[in-house]
Image (cartoon, rainbow, N blue to C red):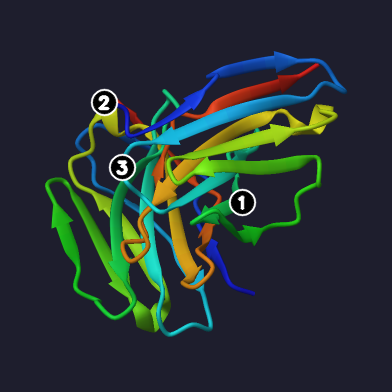
Amino acid sequence: AQKVTQAQTEISVVEKEDVTLDCVYETRDTTYYLFWYKQPPSGELVFLIRRNSFDEQNEISGRYSWNFQKSTSSFNFTITASQVVDSAVYFCAALLGIINNDMRFGAGTRLTVKP
Amino acid sequence: DTAVSQTPKYLVTQMGNDKSIKCEQNLGHDTMYWYKQDSKKFLKIMFSYNNKELIINETVPNRFSPKSPDKAHLNLHINSLELGDSAVYFCASSHRGQYEQYFGPGTRLTVT
């Protein structure tokens, strides 16, 4: 089955700690897209990043970085020097059906950053 | 300006009623979606529309029906509401070729 797995249900860290959120996907397709979304306590879903299956280059944006490894079907998200404002539910998602826009979300990881 | 907007933000209604949730996007996107997020935060796609054509129709009850008067709007109609329909419903849009979806603020539906 084509799906996205976020094994970590909840993570709690103290401010300034680094934290990595794991994401593993399954697909038979050779072309697919991976995403991370943030859902803060206010409830909206905020797009963070898109990665194409044919581009394994890692990406860094400020304190955020993403590690995409096709060999392990993983797309992990690291927050460096976490802050209280990073507290949210983070969703990994995969567009596994390009033709029919079949977007699958993981179950989400709730990150709590304590001061 | 809000990119993807939904109305209402909160909707409380009784079982058996019919209700609608409206969605509008001003991003010029050609595809719009409806998602349901349950109490455990699980997000599941319900429908997507591209150029007024239904692309995905997950196994949702036929009490749910999307209506798209134009590319900028995708409304969700729900007939004969049931307790299990209580959830947060998100509208989203994307541009074919870019794939990332932009979400509305959500509508919290409570069926009593």
| Residue named by callout 1 | B47
Figure check: B72 above or below A106: above
The chain under label 2 reads B
Element marked by disc 1? strand
User: Compared with residue B17, is residue A83 higher up or lower down, i.e. above or below?
Assistant: below
Same-chain check, marks 3 and 1: yes
Badge 1: chain ID: B
Which quadrant would the N terminus of chain B be assigned to in this image?
Answer: top left
Q: What residue type is labelled 3?
A: Leu
Q: Residue at x 62, y 41 (%)?
A: B67
Q: What residue do we see at 51% from left, 60% from top?
A: A103
Residue A75 drawn at (x, y percent): 36, 65
Pointer 2 or 3: first along the chain: 2
Image point (52%, 77%), residue name: A27
Estimate how packed mark 1 is, as few (under 14), some (14 to 19) or many (20 or more) residues with alpha carbons within 10 Å.
Answer: many
Quadrant of the frame with the C terminus of chain B: top right
Marks 2 and 1 sit apart, C-alpha to C-alpha, by 25 Å
| Mark found first going from the N terminus, 2 or 1 | 2
Q: What residue type is labelled 2?
A: Asp
Q: Name the residue under label 3.
A: B27
Residue A59, picture quadrant: bottom left
* In front of the other: B57 or A39: B57
Circle on res. B1:
2
What kind of element bears circle 2? Answer: loop
In this image, A1 relative to A82: left or right? right
Q: Which of marks 3 and 1 is nearer the N terminus?
A: 3
